[in-house]
Every structure is written in C-alpha cells, then in structure tokens.
Image: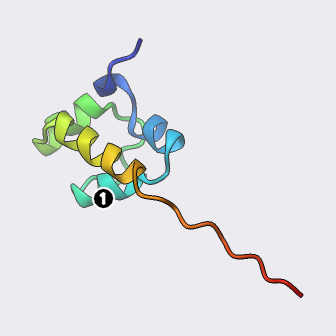
Amino acid sequence: MKNFEDFTVNEIIKADFRAATVFRKFGIDPVLNKSKTIQDVCFHFQLDSEMILDEIIEQMEVKVPMPVQMIA
C-alpha cells in the first residue's frame, strides 16, 4: 500500500476535490504542484504531512450540499 507522502497532489485532489482547499490554505498551488509528491511539497513549504492529512480528513467530513432541482 502506498504511503500518504508518496501520493501526488493531483492524485489526492482526484480522490476528493475538497483537498484542493486544504492545499491552498497552506499556500500550496494545486495546479503548479500537481505532479509533486506530498513529501516533496512538505519539504519545500516546510510543512508537516500529518497536519495536511488531518486537514484533508476534516474537509472530507464536511457534507457537500446537493444541488436543488427546480420543479417546472
């Protein structure tokens, strides 16, 4: 099994788009860093990967509102 730090930013965002918000919160541009691993990003930005993982998990627990359908 792959360790969290071995996933790329893009792989994580593909799994759950809400992770992009977490990356932005830490000053990580998801587009410019999409091919970098979490380990590389954390080293570059001097961040703790566990802190990022905790934030992503927290975001995943937030319910996404379903679009309301208009009845004609």
Q: Is residue 19 visible?
A: no
Location of the C terminus by quadrant is bottom right
Q: Pick whichever, 60 or 32, lies toward us.
A: 60
Marks counted in the figure total 1
Q: With 71 as the anchor, is 40 left or right in this view?
A: left
Q: Is residue 5 visible?
A: yes
Q: Pick whichever, 15 or 65, lies toward us.
A: 65
**Label 1: which secondary element:** helix
Kindly identify the residue that appears in the image at 24 percent across and 42 percent down: 54
Kindly identify the residue that appears in the image at 33 percent across and 23 percent down: 6
Residue 46 in the image: state x and y as whole percent: 10, 41
Residue 61 in the image: state x and y as whole percent: 40, 50
Q: With 42 as the anchor, is 18 left or right in this view?
A: right
Q: Residue furthest right?
A: 72
Q: With 66 as the anchor, is 2 left or right in this view?
A: left
Determine which residue is flagged by label 1: 24
Asked if residue 27 is positioned above or below residue 60 in the image, the reply reads below
Location of the N terminus by quadrant is top left
Residue 5 in the image: state x and y as whole percent: 28, 26
Q: Residue furthest left?
A: 46
Q: Amino acid at mark 1?
A: Arg
Residue 37 in the image: state x and y as whole percent: 33, 31
Q: Pick whichever, 54 or 3, lies toward us.
A: 54
